[in-house]
Amino acid sequence: MEGSTKKRRGIDDGNPAVDLTDDLIVEILSRLPVKSICRFKCVSWHWRGLISHRAHRKKLPQTLAGFISSYSVLHNDYKLVSIPHFDIIDGEEEEEHRLVPDPSLSFLPGYRDIFPKDCCNGLVLCLCVKESSSDYVVCNPATQKWMVLPEIGPGNEVTTIHLGFEPALSPYFHLFAIREHVDEYVSGLEIFSSETRRWSYREIGWAGDDHLINSVGKAAFVDGMMNFISADAAIVAVDTEGKKWKTIPLLEGMNCDCPFNGNSAFIGQSQGHLCYINFRDRDFSILSVWTLEDYCGCEWSFKYNISTSELLGWKNLRLEWHYSLIAIHPDCNVIFYVLLDDNKMVRSYNMDRGEVDTICRIRDPYWNTCDTFLPYVPVFVESLSRCREGRSGGAALNSPREVEAAAMECSTKKRCGIDDGNPAVDLTNDLIVEILSRLPVKSICRFKCVSWHWRRLISHRAHRKKLPQTLAGFISHYYDDDLVSIPHFDIIDGEEEEEEEEEEHRLVPDPTLSFMPEALSPKDCCNGLVLCLCTKESPMDEFSDYVVCNPATQKWMVLPEIDLVNQVATIRVGFDPALSPYFHLFAILDHVEEYTACMQIFSSETGRWSHQEIGWVGDDHLIYSSSKAAFVDGMMNFVSAYAAIVAVDTEGKKWKTIPLLKGMNCNCPFNGNSAFIGQSQGHLYYINFRDRDFSILSVWTLDDYSSCKWSFKYNISTSQLFGWPNLRFECQYSLIAIHPECNMIFYVIMVENGKMLHSYDMDRGEVNTVCTVRDPFWNTYDPFLPYVPVFVESLPDHD
């Protein structure tokens, strides 16, 4: 606890990272994903100051900071003047750390009105009005640099204009101006490039003549192409040179028109993918969310159904009539919308958690859906300052080609782990490992890709004691020709076998657990410790000892015999190294007259079993031998057959009943309540089919374990899992695990040619095959145990 407290405060006696310079910390943070950067503000006040400091922002990735809009004020000459405005999401900015130093954009001189029109990755397109003329201006509010655009060539009036910029692809931005529609189709397109500083006219290259684009329709810049919503059941896209024209057809039911203003769908970019949101089949009470995860393949993936009752508290509000979608978060599954009442509040909705938060109130009381409310992600790229103020562009320090070449060279060096003159080049392995030890486990997995050197450091056995570990694979068993049970380990991604075959890098050096003296069958696993049942050599088929072992360190402990009153019905292991170095076992003895008789609890600290009378209220807490269990918050949780989850602590002093909501306790006609529970991201998860409908699985979480309040997360159709509906839970497929770090479930499906282990990403709707179950006789009663390696030194004390 003392060591953990010091770590959180950035103090570690004898720790080489204490003397780490700020430059080195920032250099390492620059290699992290943007989500991690946001989390690491909480490591210490020193880290928060480093991450927020303006001088370091050029190196660190940024996320959504707030929204840019405008409002009108009465000027001295009694004329209304439009003034830009910036609303911060979290409201925690100090003046010296402001991401937008001048929210009114007053650094744009000589303009009476400034109307923000579009925003893309930190650049803002504004229509700036003088007394007798107006200009389109692209500016960077973070660096206060801007560029006045040349006039668009003669032709039909521009109906809509959008900005495209992706600093990861190019240091140049582009504008796409659609000419006025003629005979109900787009007449032409003007494209501006900041590299050439010229507009170029392009004839429409989309097939057909019916691609009408609404002037207030949404657009999104994804994969180097600007995407527009067409009024005719498609999304149309064009690249920055006007040479590649693409049509992405919508699936049936995605193109649902509003009777007031046609297709009011929303598109945006999030986590590198194109997202599409619209109400469902003329049902205004439901919003459907789709993603184009493979932009080239043009295949849509369904993500969520969102009820307006979740967003607003009541149903049947009309999209773009009672509320309006304005943005999707670029780094997570969060949407932002405006409730169109008298107050006009901006709210966010987390699609993963089902949480609604209020962001701010729109300052302009006359704001409507035709006005802009632009999501702003700050950018501090130096090459953008070449787009200097004034029409002439000023004197550039480098030519555009030189700037692009330098950016490419810098990017290549960073990917290869090389940086000339970079203080991190001489960083010792101890310091790198010390800093990596402060990161979440997801980041550790990603950073294997930074360089081969980092990959070896993270994989090396000597460093695993400090670094957090994630799900490595599954432990099961099969029978050899002599019908002897042999443990088996299946790796999730297969990389360890292909690239790290050296024994010192293996997470499970001996997959058969042959370091144990007897034949054994794995029964349960918790945070790296495996509970096994060992077989006596003589007489055959007679079971003797329970053994807890650590496959990563090849240490084990033989448990003393249980003082039996009845036979053991089910036994589970509980271990959480973050809470205690000791493990516990919970043995439920055979049921007597349809309720659980008693329980024996073993503690590795005392080395003894203790008899406990059942402390749950009532006598109907029947727990089947095949019932799932999960160790959460220091308590072992079991699925009861009677509409509840029951839990007990490691000392048998605290007994807890967590009631299920109506509809959660749905019994399977074959074997009663076959619900699945597990621990993921620190929360208890519950999964069961829905109201005797075998084609739907519902997922619930207990986000606050103390309050016992369930939160609904997902509905999963078996057609998403297998490609066809109506498979029977625990008869044709079986849930076996949930990933401890993300919203992913694992299940075994029974097919003609064997039994396959699959994974399903609940956020992305993706199915992947993990492995084939080796035992051809495997059934739902046999264990298939998720394994997270642990290298805690205190465990080998119990040999």
Image (cartoon, grey):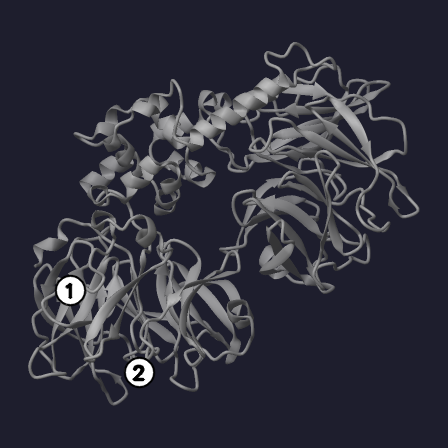
Question: As drawn, which residue projects farthest toward the bottom?
Answer: 593
Q: Quadrant of residue 170?
A: top right
From the image, state whether disc 2 or disc 1 is nearer to you.
1
Return the x and y of residue 169 as percentages of the image width and height: 58, 33
Q: Which mark is residue 620?
A: 2
Left or right, 678 with respect to 464, comes to: right
Q: Which mark is residue 514?
A: 1
Return the x and y of residue 51 as percentages of the image width and height: 42, 28
| Amino acid type, residue under disc 1 in the picture | Ser
Asked whether 547 or 405 is in front, the reply is 405
Q: Please tell me how crowded label 1 is: few (under 14), some (14-19), or many (20+) other residues with Cα within 10 Å.
A: some
Return the x and y of residue 503 as percentages of the image width and height: 21, 50
Question: As drawn, which residue projects farthest toward the top?
Answer: 395
Verify CB contact (< 8 Å) between mark 2 and mark 1.
no
Whichever of labels 2 and 1 marks the residue nearer the N terminus, that label is: 1
Left or right, 443 with respect to 63, comes to: left
Q: Is residue 555 above or below residue 664?
A: above
Give the CA distance from mark 2 to mark 1.
42 Å
Left or right, 237 with respect to 469, comes to: right
| Amino acid type, residue under disc 2 in the picture | Asp
Left or right, 313 with respect to 42, comes to: right
